[in-house]
Image (cartoon, rainbow, N blue to C red):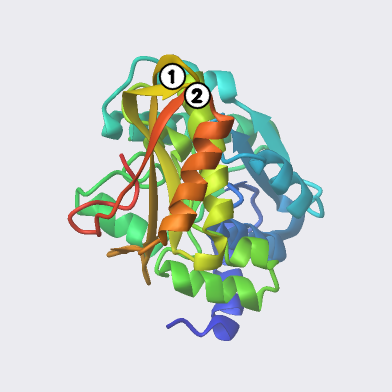
Amino acid sequence: MVDAESFIPEAISEIEEEIGDGRAVMALSGGVDSSVCATLAYEAVGDRVTPVYVDTGLMRKGETETVRETFDYMDSLRVVDARDRFLEALEGVVDPEEKRRIVGENFIRVFEEVAHDIDADYIVQGTIYPDRVESEGNIKSHHNVGGLPDIIDFEGIVEPVRDLYKDEVREVARELDLPPEISERMPFPGPGLAIRVIGEVTEEKLEVVREANAVVEDELEDYEPWQALAAVAGRGTGVKGDERVHGWIVVVRAVESRDGMTAQAIDIDWETLQRIQSRITGTLPNVARVAYDVTHKPPATIEYE
């Protein structure tokens, strides 16, 4: 386990050394990994780092507003509305790895554009050790590792927490006095809701999975899962009122884990599961049914794609 107290000054010193007298953009998502890196980088070089949050249209419900409120003390914070850009790039794409590559490339191009505006040569990002293991091990391409394009217009990539596991990053977040809403936040994939939609990403599917995901996170908060999520798995026949509905199938998943490398599906009580399905099918008229995924990792991964 990392010694967070000693790690922080070492990481700040490393960032100062890597960026030198230059400027950097910080890939900020609102998750604990990037939030820790943004805080460290801001401490290291101040306004010479520009945190950039990209609204891809693939984010959790209320994510953009949360990021604005949490990091409003950073005067250099930029929020980029790139929703149309990402949805157009993903149109017609069904292969999971292709989705990840598309999201990774569009992310880096947005950061490059901001970097050109502010004359920055470096990018700081919240890559952690499991990201590198899974990408290099050909399990799946993380958007900030294997999903990056071959040619990147940056002098260097700074990754302060690249050797840490998620639980170690949380320790650093607590030592930095980040709010629990950040330090204890469940992981969220870099490609966002795109990989919680099986098949082609559409605005309708994204709206369903975004609302369903919010219900799942709310209902399972007391279970303190490593990760809890909803995914759209396809269509199925249902009945609403006296009408046949060929609606979306939402799959709920909740797991416990230490580092994300392996995970155990959580035993959720029947009453809670029924409440989840009732809220999802009751508030989303185009959802026909809700299922619960009991598969561990392995053989499954935590995310769906």
In the image: residue 94, left or right of residue 210:
left
Q: Secondary structure at mark 1?
A: helix
Note whether residue 169 is visible.
yes
- Which residue is disc 2 drawn over? 86
Viewer-proximal residue among 271 and 128: 271
Q: Residue at x 50, y 33 (%)?
A: 281
**Viewer-closest of 208 and 115:** 208
Spatial separation of the CA atoms under disc 2 and disc 1: 5 Å
Q: Which mark is residue 139?
A: none
Expressed as whole percent of the image width and height from the top left, the position of residue 88 reads 47, 15
Compare residues 68 and 6 and report the one nearer the observer: 68
Q: Name the kind of residue labelled 1 in the image.
A: Ala
Q: Which residue does the image show at 50% across and 56% down from the upper left?
A: 126
Residue 229 drawn at (x, y percent): 45, 48
Q: Position of residue 28 (x, y in %)?
A: 60, 48
> Is the residue under label 1 in contact with that under label 2 (CB below 8 Å)?
yes
User: In the figure, is residue 93 to the left or right of 203?
Assistant: left
Residue type beneath disc 2: Phe
- Position of residue 179 relative to residue 58, above or below, is below
**Coordinates of residue 282 in the picture (x, y in percent):** 55, 33
Whether residue 204 is situated above or below residue 139 in the rendered picture? above
Question: Along the horizontal axis of the image, is 304 left or right of 109?
Answer: left
| Quarter that holds the C terminus | top left
Q: Are there few (<14), some (14-19), or many (20+) residues within 10 Å of tag 1? A: few
- Residue denoted by label 1: 89
**Image point (41%, 17%), residue name:** 245
